[in-house]
Image (cartoon, rainbow, N blue to C red):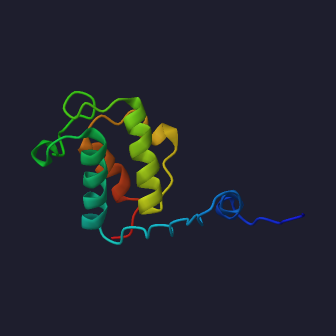
Amino acid sequence: MNHHYTNSAALASTFLDTPVHTPAPAQPAKTLREMREIIKAHILDISGAEAHAYTAKARFKEDLAMDSLDMVELVMLTERDLGVSLPDRDWVNLRTVGEIESLLEGRTNR
């Protein structure tokens, strides 16, 4: 049998009894407000922090208990959901919520 698979989902569904569905890519945020809401949702989900802990001055490590793996997850989700690319040099030294919001302001549509 010689099959040509166009993506991993097609290949996986060949070996599984149930079809595998790949989610549609997220649409980039259109406004600064939407961008901030997406970032907030990701940070609160990853950190497990309460909503009141989310402020521009909140520090990832000290206030939100986020480690380096949490930051990688945040960056990956942010890139996916906002349709931006964040090279390591741009995010590796971020310390606060306000810093990531400022970084992203110039990279999203307003």
Left or right of 18: which side holds 93?
left
* Residue 38 picture quarter: bottom left
Give the quarter of the figure containing the C terminus. bottom left
Q: Measured along the vertical axis of the image, is residue 90 above or below residue 25?
A: above
Residue 9 is situated, as x and y percent measured from the top left of the image, at 64, 62
Q: Say which residue appears at 39% left-offset and 64% top-offset.
A: 108
Q: Measured along the vertical axis of the image, is residue 7 above or below residue 101?
A: below
Q: Say which residue appears at 55% left-offset and 65% top-offset.
A: 22
* Closer to the camera in the image, 2 or 72: 2
* Closer to the camera in the image, 106 or 82: 82
Q: Measured along the vertical axis of the image, is residue 110 above or below residue 69?
A: below
Left or right of 50: which side holds 34?
right
* Closer to the camera in the image, 3 or 77: 3
Give the quarter of the figure containing the N terminus. bottom right
* Closer to the camera in the image, 3 or 65: 3
Left or right of 109: which side holds 19?
right
Q: Say which residue appears at 13% left-offset and 42% top-offset.
A: 53
* Residue 96 picture quarter: top left
Residue 84 is situated, as x and y percent measured from the top left of the image, at 48, 58
Residue 64 is situated, as x and y percent measured from the top left of the image, at 22, 35
Q: Say which residue appears at 17% left-offset and 40% top-offset.
A: 57
Q: Measured along the vertical axis of the image, is residue 23 above or below residue 95?
A: below
